Image (cartoon, rainbow, N blue to C red):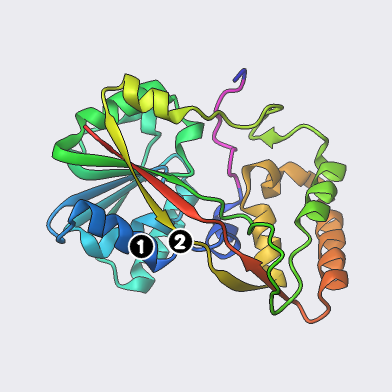
Amino acid sequence: MGWEWDSSLYAGSAAYYARGRLAYPAALAEAIATELGLDGSGRLLDAGCGPGSLTLLLAGHFREVVGVDADRDMLAEAGRRADAAGVRHAKWVHLRAEDLPAGLGRFDLITFAQSFHWMDRPKVAATARGMLTDGGACAHVHATTTHGTDTAEPLPYPRPPHAEIADLVRAHLGAVRRAGQGQLPDGTPDGESEIYRAAGFTGPVRVEVPGRVVTRVTEDLVAAVYSRSSSAPHLFGDARAAFEAELRELLHRTSPSGLFSELTSEIVVDLWRA
């Protein structure tokens, strides 16, 4: 990509991530559990787990869950959320996926939820395959959690002004997408299917979970902006207060009540077998 990962990729975003991102629905965990026949006896590894958004959703289907992430603040947030949810069988490990297996053992399911594109994908895919138990699977979650989808369906409240928010971010940070200390003029890479196959995986079996209408408030949408690598808090520097004032004004103009409605995107999970 002509871009290299650095530790500032999500600097300052952890406090905003869980609130700002559209939560994965319980139906996602149920669909994965049904397809894989999960019975609560296995081990889960969530690679690039962030604040545990998917890890904690799946935790009830496993004897032990392990989340790894390169951002310490994300892991601290995951630990707080696990404690609040009463999840006692979760372990949070600070490392990049490129440093796996790191003595973590074997797993029945390894998940990549909006994280694989930040990694050395061929290396991580090959390592992940070697960490799976016999009959284990790797789940690649395709989801958009920063915003909903366009729809002509009537909604209870105004839709968030996502296009205008993006314009405002560009006005402050420039036209080229920021990512840590670098830039991603062409966005993040795709083509992960070829990478999984090259690593020796077979499949995929595809699981789909439909979208749903959700209500969001102003603070959710402010948090959503700061939860993104392309508009992480540190990128605004001294202009952050001015940016946020403009953002809040835009949101108030769109919905003076501070309430917004969105139809979430369909979530697709590709299950790859070792």
Disc 1 secondary structure class: helix
User: Label 1: few (<14), some or many (≥20) within 10 Å?
Assistant: some
Residue shown at 41%/29% (left/top)?
193
Task: Decide whether residue 123 is among the magenta residues.
Answer: no
Task: Reply above or below: 261 against 128.
Answer: below
Q: What residue is pinned by disc 2?
A: 24
Task: Reply above or below: 46 against 78.
Answer: above
Residue 17, percent across and down? 56, 57
The magenta span reads: 3-11
Q: Amino acid at mark 2?
A: Tyr
Contact? badges 1 and 2 (CB < 8 Å) = yes
Residue shown at 79%/61% (left/top)?
161
Q: Can you tell which quarter of the image residue 103 is in? A: top left
Residue 95, percent across and down? 38, 37
Disc 2 secondary structure class: loop
Q: What residue is pinned by disc 1?
A: 57
Chief secondary structure of the magenta span?
A: loop
